[in-house]
Image (cartoon, helix red, strand yellow):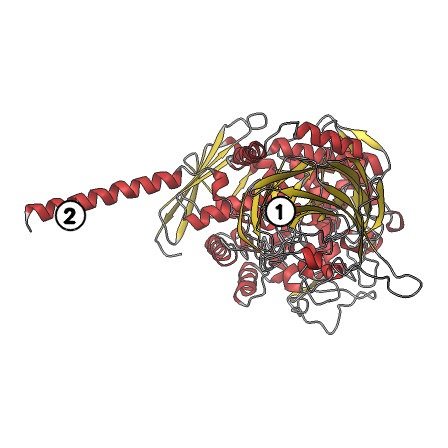
Amino acid sequence: MTFQRKFMNMKRALLWVVSSVLVFAATSAKEPVEWVNPFIGTTNFGTTNPGAVMPNGLMSVSPFNVMGSDQNRFDKDARWWSTPYDNTNSFFTGFSHVNLSGVGCPELGSRLVMATTGDVNVDYHNYGTTYTDEYATPGFYRLRLSKYDILAEATATMRSGRIRFTFPAGKGNILLNLGEGLTNESGATVSRISDTEVAGCKLLGTFCYNSQAVFPIYFVMRVSRTPQAQGFWKKQRLMHGVEAEWDKDNGKYKLYPDFGKQMSGDDVGVWYTFDTSANEQIEVSVGVSFVSVENARLNLSTEQPEGSDFDALRNSASAAWNDMLGRIKVEGGTDVQTTVFYTALYHTLIHPNILQDVNGEYPAMESHKILRTTGNRYTVFSLWDTYRNLHQLMTLIYPERQIEMVRSMVDMSKEWGWLPKWELFGRETFTMEGDPAIPVIVDTWRKGLTDFDIDAAYIAMKKSADTAGKSNPMRPDIDPYINYGYIPLGFFAGDNSGDNSVSHALEYYVADNALAWLAEHRGDKEFACELRKRASGWKHYYSPESGTLRPINPDGSFLTPFNPRQGENFEPVPGFHEGSAWNYTFYVPHDVKGLAAKMGGRRAFVDKLQKVFDDGLYDPANEPDIAYPYLFSYFKGEEWRTWQTVSEILDKYYKNAPDGIPGNDDTGTMSAWAVFSMIGLYPDVPGVPEYTLTVPTFDKITIKLNSDYYHTESLIIEKSGNAKKCNVLLDGTPIGHRISHQKLVNGKKLLFTIDSRKK
């Protein structure tokens, strides 16, 4: 080889090294917000949306694309209509303001703001359009409306949204549709305040078809320039038994261009028309409040003061997300893993969200009263989901928010007498089962976050655990639970979902186990003893014949015939809610060793649990079984099954794609599972301050701990080696595969050492 060729080869090698270093440096230098893909979970029933929102913000501005041109509004009751956006759809009808993320029941997703060109058309079947150039990042969303060649961009503050429309030359329109949306309520009132401002009230509610859980949302909307024309519209009804004479362009909607005062009723709206020059930008600002129009205006004026700039608002949202996501730094994973991780963390920070206005006012729980808070009042407590992991994540990473969430729950009990179960903007929806606020509050207290009214919390917990069923909205079937230790088939289900006796009882066992510790801690020893006895009642349901938990008839016999797999496709099944017996049989997190004994010992337990995964009986999107992979680690020598199974689930179900969440994200629960699993620990026993450990996804994780709550500034989690066997060291000292919260947060480095010796 000639010197020249050697020199050229060395030069190429050097250039490759330099370019590789630069690429690595560029990748490493990316901000956390740049790793988030808001389109993850926007199909496959993930029910997330890519809209603009602030961390735990009240306002979210989402693209609304679930109404196709050949669909009608009642189709929302199909399962995928519990979200304003699905990635497989492409018919945009506006931006909805205030939305839910990851839920399975249709609600909110209303006050749709749309831009069009040409003559005013207010029938969404006609004005909707396909779109291109879609892009989203935390706090910002953009698309181009194909029919109109309008660029539409959205961002958000905590209580308000800003939309920027860039129009072509000609006649442009902005529409506010107050009738369509995900809510089952279509009524609204809207008033003209000035040429550029309207205000009003929109009725929401009936979440999961609870017909009484309705509530108002107040709004103010402003456009950035004076229109050439404006007016209201209203959907027309039948006249004297025959259809009215419909407008040929707007269908059943009647325009009111000369009526400039106020419009009320079902399916009403507002329209503006402008003469626009090419690339002219018109902005729409929307403020909301659950207290009053005056507060909505105050929220809007405070968070978007006169002269505020769209790009400045967007940058502020991005900075807020960077601050929150930056609490955890991950290194050494693939780009896909890093994107999945930060997107999951992003999703855990959407709900619960604040409820109070900038002046501190909020609607009291189940009351007409308006109260005032000095801190944050939170709402959207999907506790049947989030009590399992999301609140434990908040406690570890964002304790300053978790403590205010607990205060909010305790204050709710003071306002209406009970802790929340599935609370939504001051109304209790009674969705799903159990008494899930109890383990959340006990878990928080036991981890050292004690700056809340524990006396009031205990009174409320004891009330729901002791009040007779006829007077107990939280546990309407508590009487047989106390009398027999279990709930037989045939008793009223408080959530109107069917005869879910086993599911209900299992949730009560977990809550009472957590409450037993608190009762003992407070010296209420007799009550603690009773609660521990109740928490062991799961044993009544174990059937040696089926090898699973099994519903019990009113006469005390097991349900016969019985198929443990019935319900795995969400078909109705006696005793279990949205799942089969296999999805619930291992859900005795507070007594795993006792369950193993019932099954015949360690070997039988491990083999049966492995069968759940081998035979496809595990559902990664069903809350009662999402901790199953961690149960192997209760038995020495079987820990490898935990980290192998966790790794396989992450690789299979959590992807950088619209279907990258295995099902409903359930206000961040599925995402919290991924976050914990990827950093190497999981809180598998609600109410108990411990974690089961698993090999982390990344080579190094740095968690910034809040010094107001924890003594250590940061916790480092590392792994070294790869293959079959794992040992864990905390600050150089070997530990097992479980760790207490206090040891974790008082440590500095958690090290997983992995070697290739045979398992």
Given residues 100 and 151, the one toward you in this image is 151
Residue receiving disc 1: 170
Give neighbour class at mark 1: few <14, some 14-19, many 20+ (Cα, 10 Å): few
Quarter that holds the C terminus: bottom left
| Vertical arrangement, residue 179 with respect to residue 687, above or below | below
- From the viewer's perspective, is 234 left or right of 549? right
Residue receiving disc 2: 9
Given residues 453 and 252, the one toward you in this image is 252
Give neighbour class at mark 2: few <14, some 14-19, many 20+ (Cα, 10 Å): few
Q: Earlier in the sequence, mark 2 or mark 1?
A: 2
Q: Residue at x 53, y 26 (%)?
A: 711
Label 2 secondary element = helix
Label 1 secondary element = strand
| Vertical arrangement, residue 125 with respect to residue 178, above or below | below
Check the image and name the residue furthest to the bottom: 561
**Residue 448 visible in this rendered orientation of the protein:** no
**Residue 153 visible in this rendered orientation of the protein:** yes
